[in-house]
Amino acid sequence: MEKKISKRIMLVHENEDYKIYRAACDCISHECDMTIELEICPPTNFLILSLDKKLKWSSQWSYDYERPIYSWFVDKWKRITVALKILFTGYIEVEDSFLMKDNDHIDAFIDAIRNGQQLLNERVAKKNVSAESGVQSDS
Ligand SMILES: [Zn+2]
């Protein structure tokens, strides 16, 4: 089902109302992939673009291997403070990067969004014409 647009951008799924792409991050971790989803949302027929990616937080990211005992306590302290933050506020803030390190990757990313956008806008226009003329559209 996957159709490659480039070696790092693949069309994963599509139907008449949405297109879903998977974009590979240039850090090479598959856990870092991004999902690009273009969707026509009824009943307004707005075109919505969403970029989804797993976000992670780790207490061990700043682990200092030269000071393992100190790092063990820092790790536990970070876990406790984050747990308290979630307990008292209900959320934590995290961010993560998605890397594109050359023009081909950036162009393929833009092309995937543009192609999906054009195709779905054509379908929206067709649906609007059908709705105005009172004709039931199958596409
Ligand atoms: Zn990555």
Image (cartoon, rainbow, N blue to C red):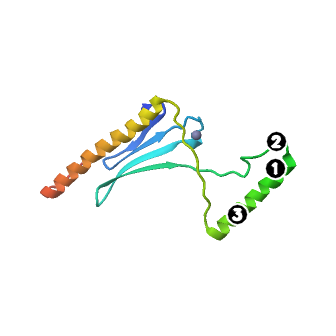
Q: Earlier in the sequence, mark 1 or mark 2?
A: 2
Q: Earlier in the sequence, mark 3 or mark 1?
A: 1
Quadrant where ligand 1 appears: top right
Q: What amino acid type should be assigned to the residue bearing mark 3? A: Ala
Position of residue 89 measured from the top left corner of the image (x, y, whole percent): 62, 68
Position of residue 72 measured from the top left corner of the image (x, y, whole percent): 82, 51
Q: Secondary structure at mark 1?
A: helix
Give the residue pinned by disc 3. Answer: 83
Q: Residue at x 69, y 61 (%)?
A: 82
Q: What amino acid type should be assigned to the residue bearing mark 2? A: Tyr
Q: Residue at x 57, y 42 (%)?
A: 32
Spatial separation of the CA atoms under disc 2 and disc 3: 24 Å
Q: What amino acid type should be assigned to the residue bearing mark 1? A: Ser
Position of residue 116 measured from the top left corner of the image (x, y, whole percent): 34, 42
Give the residue pinned by disc 1. Answer: 71
Give the residue pinned by disc 2. Answer: 65
Q: Secondary structure at mark 3?
A: helix
How crowded pointer 3 is (Cα within 10 Å; few <14, some 14-19, many 20+) is rated as some
* Foreground disc of the pair 3, 1: 1
Whether 132 is drawn above or below 99: the answer is below
Whether 40 is drawn above or below 90: the answer is above
Q: Residue furthest left?
A: 133
| Residue in the foreground of this view, choosing between 42 and 49 | 49
Position of residue 3 measured from the top left corner of the image (x, y, whole percent): 41, 34
* Residue 3 seen anywhere in this rendered image of the structure: no
Q: Are marks 1 and 2 in contact (CB under 8 Å)?
A: yes
* Residue 114 seen anywhere in this rendered image of the structure: yes
Whether 12 is drawn above or below 52: the answer is above
Q: Residue at x 67, y 68 (%)?
A: 87
Spatial separation of the CA atoms under disc 1 and disc 2: 8 Å
Q: Secondary structure at mark 2?
A: loop
